[in-house]
Image (spheres, rainbow, N blue to C red):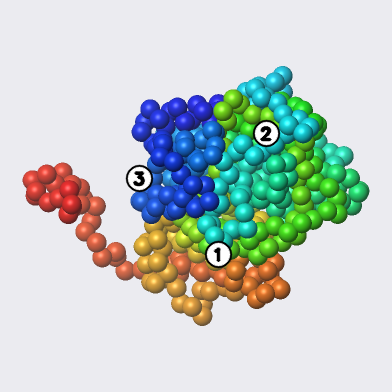
Amino acid sequence: MSSLRDLLARLDREGELCHVTAPVDRTWEIAAVMRKVLSFPADQRPALLFENVQGFESPLLVGLYTNRRRYAKALGLSTNDEVNERWREALDHPLPVQEVQGGPCKEVVLTGDNASIDSLPLARWTPDKDAGLFFTSQAVITREPGSDYVNVGTYRMQYRSRNETNLFVNPAQHVGMIFGQYEARGERMPVAVAIGADPAVTLVAPAKIPYGMSELEVAGALMGRPLEVTRGETVDLLVPASAEIVLEGYLEPGSRSTEGPFGEFAGVLSKSYDMPVFHITAVTHRRKPILQSFVSQKAPSESSLLRSVVLEALTLRTLRGLGIPAVAAHVPESGAAWYHFVVSIKKMHPAHPRMVMNAIWAAMPALAKRIVVVDEDVEPADAFQVEMAVATCVQPARDLTILEGYMGQIEDPSPTPGQEHMSSKLGVDATRKHPYPAVALPEPHYMQRVEDRWEEYGIKPLGD
């Protein structure tokens, strides 16, 4: 898809986009409606376009990525099975961006005193509990000082005024590493924020791409063509030309203000933090722009699905890059799409499962509090099969690995207060350690004979 609107047009034709024309209150109603939709089975969840947010002309798009089918469609793919391979190809062969003059994101250009975000229908995502209104789906674009390296990430932004937001800058994340360099120099950090950009940009921004690799170039490879970018009006940064909205501005070194709490992916409210202020110097957008937002909060959510998909691809790429064979990987949303990993292998050596664990912990030290390694005949995404493997293949004294004093993730509520960046790790070797008796199931040729005659039995699932 070459733009968000291209994708929405396709989803409209295929019945996956629901136009909500009833008036809705952004302070509670949008979040509550989305929670109801997230209670549906994943393949039955529509994307929602709220066209009548009270007090606003622009529509609000939420829930675009609440199932894997639409994730595949956003990349122009037919099946979920193709997504991992597309990600691996894109990471191995990123494409340089293509700079163009202007673009749809500059149909309206507002600078100086006219630069305002007050026309955008920002929502409160945890009613009565979040500290305020938040941007949640944006691609935040920064560049390392004195370097060509451009980083893109999705970091929450809390509304402060018509031309200011907070920007959540975690020192352990790439944006924090870059901002730390600007602060050490005593320099402002230029920032551009693309909202409703090309679908590939929106998918790559929340991903944990290795530091030094440009997400904009990976986005181009995901699309199969260079990403078209245009130069900012007030900052020397390149932004996706087809974005719905672009905010430009800077972070002031040494300046902080209170941000949060916010209902985060771990399912609880985050703490309040002192975070930098994003001073907005320009707002450019399409005519009647669509504000895209991700619904986060307690899983299942849009943000948890986005993390789950890309972390599976990154896990397989990491293992195979180290020469550690792996068949498949799954990062379940029930593990907040951060903390629980399952990997299947064709075991080559008794230490093979431990090698998998150590590689993931080294490559993603803040993630994967629990890693379960299973045999190749176990489907990692099938929780029943994984639980069965743990139940029948694990002896706790032999097969559990615990590491203490490891890196944690700041929004994990489980560490002792004051130790938020620390975590222990659990590895579970749920592979078979010796030959097992025959599986207690009918042989496949019997199952096929039943399949061939199924209509004759007249048996149907209840409810059909």
Nearer to me, 360 or 113: 113
Nearer to me, 109 or 98: 109
Q: Which mark is residue 268?
A: 1
- Tally of numbered tags: 3
Type of residue at label 1?
Val
In front: label 3 or label 1: 1
Q: Residue under label 2, please give it.
A: 246
Residue pictured at 80% horizontal, 49% vertical? 179
Depicted 429 relative to depicted 33: above or below:
below
Q: Residue furthest right?
A: 185
Q: Is residue 361 visible?
A: no
| Left or right: where 423 falls relative to 186 | left
Q: Secondary structure at mark 1?
A: loop
Q: Secondary structure at mark 3?
A: helix
Q: Which mark is residue 44?
A: 3
Residue pictured at 61% horizontal, 50% vertical? 133
Looking at the image, is mark 3 or mark 1 earlier in the sequence? 3
Report x, y in % for residue 196: 58, 35
Looking at the image, is mark 2 or mark 3 earlier in the sequence? 3
Residue pictured at 49% horizontal, 47% vertical? 25
Type of residue at label 3?
Gln
Q: Secondary structure at mark 2?
A: strand
| Left or right: where 279 falls relative to 285 | right
| Circle 1 crowding by C-alpha within 10 Å: few under 14, some 14–19, many from 20 | some
Looking at the image, is mark 2 or mark 1 earlier in the sequence? 2
Picture quarter containing residue 282?
top right
Type of residue at label 2?
Val
